[in-house]
Amino acid sequence: MSLPHAILTALLEKPSSGLELTRRFDKSIGYFWSATHQQIYRELGKLEAEGLIRALPAEQPARGQRKSYEVLPAGRAELARWTAAAQDPKPMRDTLLLRLRAAAVVGTAGIEADLRRHLELHERQLAEYREIEKRDFPPGRDSPQDRLHHLILRAGIDLETFWTQWLAHALQEFTALPAGGPAPGVTDGEASNGGAGTTPPR
C-alpha cells in the first residue's frame, strides 16, 4: 500500500497533475520509491474513487487539459494513520549477494567484472546525492521539514557509502580467489547442504 501513500504525500506537498507527479517522482521521491507513469495514473483513479483526493476544477475548461489533484480531509487522515502505524523492517533480498553465494559452489566467472560495474554505479549515485545535499541543504536550512528531507537524503548517502566501501572490499578479496573456476575447498557434501561450516547462513 505504499505507492498511494507516496502519492498522497506528494499531493499534500503540492497539488499536481499525473504528469507533474511523474516528473516529481523521477526527481525526488523516486530515489527511494519508484513508480511508472501508468502506476501513478492508476493509483490516482483509485484514490479519487475512494474519496481521498479530488480533481481541481479547471479555471478555463478545455478539451485534453490535464487534471490536477488535491488531497481531501479523508486522504490526509489516511496518510496520518499510515504514517503513525508500526511497520517491521523488510527482510533483505539482494541478487548480488545470492550470486556470490552461488559462486562459492559453481565458480566466480563473470562476477568480478559485475562487481566493478556495481561499484561504478554506486559511486555515481553517491556523487549525485552529495551534489543534491550541497545544493539543497546549505548551512542554515533547519526547519522541521528541511531536517526530515535531509534525513532521508542522508539515508541514501549512507547506504551508497556502505555499498561503495563493501564493493571495494569485495574486489580486494577477489584478488586472492582463483579466476573463473569453482571455489576451492567446497566438497560435494558441503555443496549439497549449502556449504555448512564454510559460510554462515543468511
Image (cartoon, helix red, strand yellow):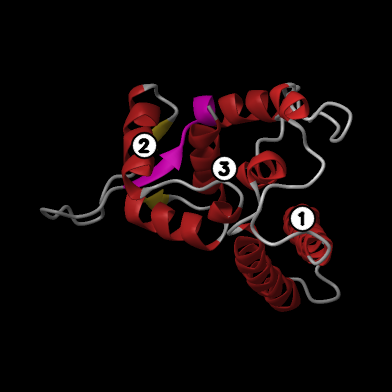
Provide the residue designation for mark 1.
Answer: 159
Of residue 11 and residue 119, the one placed in the foreground of this image is 119
Residue 74 within the segment the image draws in magenta? yes
The disc at residue 129 is none
- How many tags in the picture? 3
The reply, left or right, for residue 140 in relation to residue 80 is right
Say which residue appears at 66% left-offset and 63% top-offset. 112
Say which residue appears at 28% left-offset and 48% top-offset. 67
Of residue 121 and residue 139, the one placed in the foreground of this image is 121
Task: Nearest to the eye among marks 1 and 3: give it.
Answer: 1
For residue 161, which quarter of the picture? bottom right
| Boundaries of the magenta span | 68-75
Say which residue appears at 64% left-offset and 26% top-offset. 82
The disc at residue 44 is 2
Quarter occupied by the C terminus: top right
Q: Amino acid at mark 2?
A: Leu
Pinpoint residue 68: horizontal percent, then vertical percent: 34, 49
Q: CA gap, disc 3 to disc 2?
A: 13 Å
Pinpoint residue 75: horizontal percent, then vertical percent: 51, 29
Q: Is residue 58 visible?
A: yes
Q: Amino acid at mark 1?
A: Leu
Disc 3 secondary structure class: helix
> Marks 2 and 3: in contact by CB < 8 Å?
no
